[in-house]
Image (cartoon, rainbow, N blue to C red):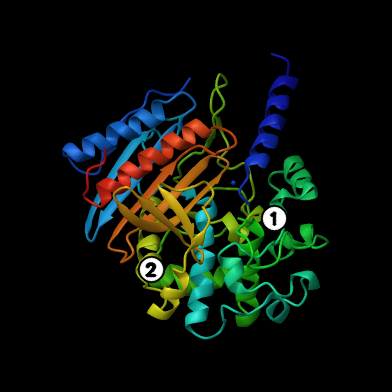
Amino acid sequence: MPSSQPRTRRLRLRAACVAALCLAALTPATASTAATPGPRDTDLRRQLEALVDTPGGPPGAIAVLQQDGHRRVVTAGVADLATGRKPQINDHMRIASVAKAFSGAVALSLVDRHALRLDDTIGRRLPQLPKAWYQVTLRQLLNHTSGLPDYSDDPEFRQIITADPHHIFDPHHLLDFVADEPLLFRPGSQYHYSNSDNIAVALMAEAVTGTPYEQLLRELVYRPLHLRDTSLPQGYLMPRPYLHGYAVAPPAPPEDVSELFSASASWASGGIVSTPADLTRFIRGYVGGALFGPDVVRQQRRWIPGASEPAGPGRNSAGLALFRYETRCGVVLGHTGNTAGYTQLAAATPDGRRSLTFSVTSQITQSTNPQLLQRLRTVQENFVCALLGRPGH
């Protein structure tokens, strides 16, 4: 085979992954649960297997359902096509836009401590940003009604990351890519999901504390929730062991894209690496109010029309760095995300006592595979029903 063909495929793969970046012949599937499966777990396992077996489906999947101290782990497929190793709850993975919930956790913790206010503006806290953005508030950044243009859609940004996916960006200058652009609309008048919002949230948190965002994560989120395997790296390497993420585009074989991009390209908007075990601890504490008091929780849950990216199960509405997923079996709160090689859902009941994390090892989007995304959302909803102890069909 001429050497130019693999290079051409790699370049096309980079372009395709960049286009879907959220700044988003298979090995036969096998499945297991953490303990001897009961009838309900067997049904969940079959659904997860069927998702993995779907043409163009992800090579691997892992879901963790937890109720108080009882944990159920359901897996399908493999964590690594090269070795056939099965997914495990301590495998690292890119959590994509679920990282926005972490930036929300930092900001709302600071609101709870009166270091920030929800009506603080970009003009007050980040005067180095364009004056056209000065009236945007922290609340509007957190619920995606700011109107900030999305830096990850900028042609120059995409050109850089396509040419050199491992490029290390200075996260403090990611918004420079759109600094010459006006707001998309009057702040607060519309919902528009933008990766720029959570970059600005992290910059606000740094500005009022004088502390690097990564340290704020450790002090305000990782430590109180006992997250042992969660980090925000700058580079592209994944901690071992990890769930390998794949670009799946039949009839070509899946291609490992786990370490395709530098995490600095998405930073507070999508760069965090975690594990299913840690993500379970995070979403239970974050939704359950372990990080801030009831007054802030009430503000966070002022819902407006809006959906996460990709849309979560059921009917979606948006709060402050949190989404409400109203399923046929009940309500859970959480966040989704997708990036090259990974699609994520982390959700919990409003009291944080029951939680679901649902991770698959390919990027599934409305634009690239709407049928597969709809199937994914259906399976996710069935898992929510199982979590809530209600009929899943």
Seen as rendered, the residue at the extreme top is 1
Asked if residue 377 is positioned above or below residue 279 in the image, the reply reads above
Let me know if residue 142 appears in the view.
Answer: yes
Residue at image position (36%, 54%) is 277
Give the residue type at disc 2: Leu
Q: In front: mark 2 or mark 1?
A: 1
Q: Nearer the viewer, residue 241 or 155?
A: 155
Query: Neighbour class for label 2 at 10 Å: few (<14), some, many (≥20)?
Result: some
**Mark 1 residue element:** loop
**Quarter that holds the C terminus:** top left
For disc 2, the marked residue is 225
| Residue 254 in the image, given as x and y percentages of width and height | 53, 27
The reply to whether residue 130 is visible in this rendering is: no
**Can you give x and y, in whole percent of width and height, for residue 34 in the image?**
24, 44
Q: Is residue 103 left or right of residue 348?
A: right
Q: Which residue is mark 1?
A: 150
**Marking on residue 262:** none
35 left or right of 165? Answer: left
User: What residue is rendered at 46% in x and 29% in y?
Assistant: 57
Q: How many marks?
A: 2
